[in-house]
Image: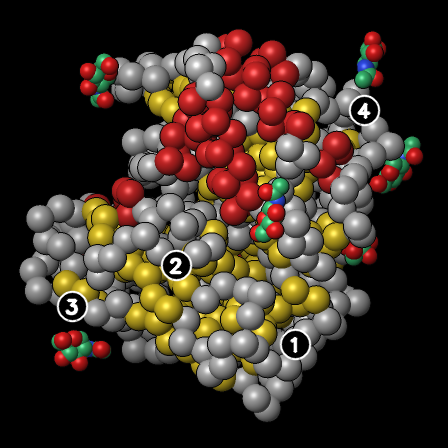
Amino acid sequence: MRISALLATTLVSLLSLTPHRTYAATCHSDLSKTDFPNCLLLESRYALHWSVDEKLAEITFGVTVDVDNAWIGFGLSENGGMRGADIYVISPEREGKLGVRGYWADGPGVPALDTQQNAKIVESWTKRGAGKTTAVWKRKLNTCDPQDHPIANVTEQSVIWAIGSSDIFGQHAPENRGSSRVTFRPDPNVKPAVADPSDVQTFEYHFNYTVPNDKPTTYTCSHRLFALPSADTKYHIIHYEGLPQSKLVHHMIMYACIQPPARTEDYYDCASMDQYCQQYVMGWAPGQGKTQLPNEAGLPVGKDGFTYFSLQVHYENPDLLPNVVDTSGFKISYTPTLRQHDLGTLFVGSTRINIPANSMSHTLDAACPGGCTKRFPHPITIWKNLFHMHSTGTAMQTRHISSNGTELAPLGIRTHYDLNFQSQTDPIGGLRTFNPGDQLLTTCSYSTPSRSNATRFGESTASEMCFNILQYWPRIPEVEWCVDHGGVSSCTTLANFTGVGMKKYQELAASGVNLDTQEGLKVLAGEWVKSGLFVPAALGNFTKYEGKCERSGGLSGTTVGSGAAKMQGLGALVMGLVAAVIWTLA
Ligand SMILES: *[C@@H]1O[C@H](CO)[C@@H](O)[C@H](O)[C@H]1NC(C)=O
Ligand SMILES: *[C@@H]1O[C@H](CO)[C@@H](O)[C@H](O)[C@H]1NC(C)=O
Ligand SMILES: *[C@@H]1O[C@H](CO)[C@@H](O)[C@H](O)[C@H]1NC(C)=O
Ligand SMILES: *[C@@H]1O[C@H](CO)[C@@H](O)[C@H](O)[C@H]1NC(C)=O
Ligand SMILES: *[C@@H]1O[C@H](CO)[C@@H](O)[C@H](O)[C@H]1NC(C)=O
Ligand SMILES: *[C@@H]1O[C@H](CO)[C@@H](O)[C@H](O)[C@H]1NC(C)=O
């Protein structure tokens, strides 16, 4: 809902029509626990109730909101933003009776009415007056309508909400909205989070920074030593929490550094992030509370883990307010009482990016081939996806192909990628078992209609990336980087990739090989494979996953983009490789 922030100034006149507000919403004040076993207070003004009927494959939503003279909005969002959101608006229709209408937000701005209306108001429970509104409506778990999101089984989903300024649906005031995460159909077998051990300690990392007022959008980075009680002890991070302190904070990301940072400034523009501090660890976006790591695994810090962290804060200051000092950051809880497993990070995706200028749509495929994953000493359980591209990214997905040649449901899909809503998502269908020899095929799509130059791989926002940063357990320390460089895929640690990549590049350049040519790059790829840290990026033939919509609400997910098996020889090495090496030299 970034658009609302940008339009804030034009909304001042609307704000004079302040909604009546005399009542604080609570769960189950107006809807019973019997009818609605589930409820989440999305904000002090907005209670979301729901009940799921698996037999009828239906969900009933019930919201209680503390206004009685304005429209109410609720949406199923791809990742917390408006783009690609399935939105329901409750407002008076015939004879002043409240009705529900479905909308679809394909892009930023006011969403459009759905072609097909799949939700029905439940009149017996719907009422308003005395400063509050209760609205109840139902729909199929999976409507099979591309303008609706399915209610996923077991998987956490993003929801967004808004309260209008009058009964006429339109722009809402920036403070009358928010987002949250909900698992509508939790796994009945899932065990509750284990209690914290008694030796949990906390570390707070926060800024103390004056938000720039010479531009509306700022990404500021800073890094810090994670001051641990003992340098030669290993600890596990077990939960964390974003601590936003200013309304100007749009989102925050904490990265770990693979070695002490090279940058020395206190605060700097993230357009050139420290090259050693780019390993995603945790994020925060509005509405997000405490994140609990799985019972099975903790994030290792200290001995055998990270010691430096880097914090990135994105500020939106549309009114160019001066002298706003922000002290936002994270509170991290960690313990020397280790969980059974370390949480590992695996990068998949591509550095072989070369998006033509003025391109409406450009798509690339990237392999994490079985040739790499068959080196895994054991199966892994994938816990989260984090899709990462920059500003020209439009869609992304990671497909999962079993070692027996059968493609499984995709690991995750973003159809409306938004740089500003990047938080981690559950694999489709919940925790995913990934066996040695299985393969991942990541597809990234971009649109550059107003760029007059080609866009290459790089860390600055003018360049692009294509990474799905997976978190899983048990950690395999030897492989954290299974990234397609065009014909070859790395199968190593990030540190070894950087080290070996640079060394081989420099050796070959010194021996006279021209690395600006296809031939030269082929030599480099050959050397890389010889080092044992790279494998050919060829995927074998496989049977495509046929995503089909099941109105029963079962597992679904269709793949987008090119579907053919990818067979690329070493000779197909392209310029992305050079970008990757340049990146490591930067
Ligand atoms: C921020 O910095 C100022 C000036 O150095 C200091 O007075 C203040 O206590 C700091 N605030 C926090 C929360 O650290
Ligand atoms: C291939 O492996 C997957 C699990 O990885 C399994 O679900 C599927 O039944 C297998 N298919 C065949 C044809 O063996
Ligand atoms: C595009 O490329 C041209 C030629 O290399 C260069 O002069 C120009 O600065 C580039 N433009 C941008 C916006 O990077
Ligand atoms: C990879 O890195 C590890 C330590 O980080 C080192 O011991 C090992 O020799 C490296 N392997 C290669 C082939 O460079
Ligand atoms: C893939 O299938 C094609 C056509 O069926 C076949 O010619 C080719 O050898 C297969 N490749 C592999 C690696 O199995
Ligand atoms: C939902 O997931 C649970 C846990 O994996 C499974 O037992 C159940 O059969 C699934 N329900 C549907 C409708 O797929």
Lower position in the chain sequence, tag 3 or tag 1: 3
Do residues under tags 1 and 4 come within 8 Å of each other at their CB atoms?
no
* Mark toward the viewer: 2 or 3: 2
Lower position in the chain sequence, tag 4 or tag 3: 3
Q: CA distance from mark 2 to mark 3?
A: 27 Å
Do residues under tags 4 and 2 come within 8 Å of each other at their CB atoms?
no
Do residues under tags 2 and 3 come within 8 Å of each other at their CB atoms?
no
- Residue 260 image label: 2
Look at label 4 and name its amino acid. Answer: Thr
Please state the quadrant of the image where ligand 1 appears: bottom left
Q: Nearer the viewer, residue 290 or 366?
A: 366
Q: Can residue 398 be seen by looking at this rendering?
A: no
Q: Is residue 249 left or right of residue 502?
A: left
Do residues under tags 1 and 2 come within 8 Å of each other at their CB atoms?
no
Look at label 1 and name its amino acid. Answer: Leu
Q: Is residue 393 left or right of residue 219?
A: right
Q: Is mark 3 within 8 Å of ligand 1?
A: yes
Q: CA distance from mark 3 to mark 1?
A: 37 Å
Location of residue 120 in the rendering, given as x and y in whole percent from the top left corner: 57, 49
Residue at numbered disc 1: 338
Q: CA distance from mark 1 to mark 2?
A: 25 Å
Q: CA distance from mark 1 to mark 4?
A: 41 Å
Lower position in the chain sequence, tag 1 or tag 4: 1
> Which quadrant of the view contains residue 23?
bottom left
* Mark toward the viewer: 1 or 2: 2
The 10 Å Cα crowd at callout 2, few under 14, some 14 to 19, many 20 or more, is some
SS type, badge 1: loop
The 10 Å Cα crowd at callout 1, few under 14, some 14 to 19, many 20 or more, is some
Q: CA distance from mark 4 to mark 3?
A: 56 Å
- Residue 543 image label: 4
Given the current orientation, which residue lies at the most extreme front position?
511
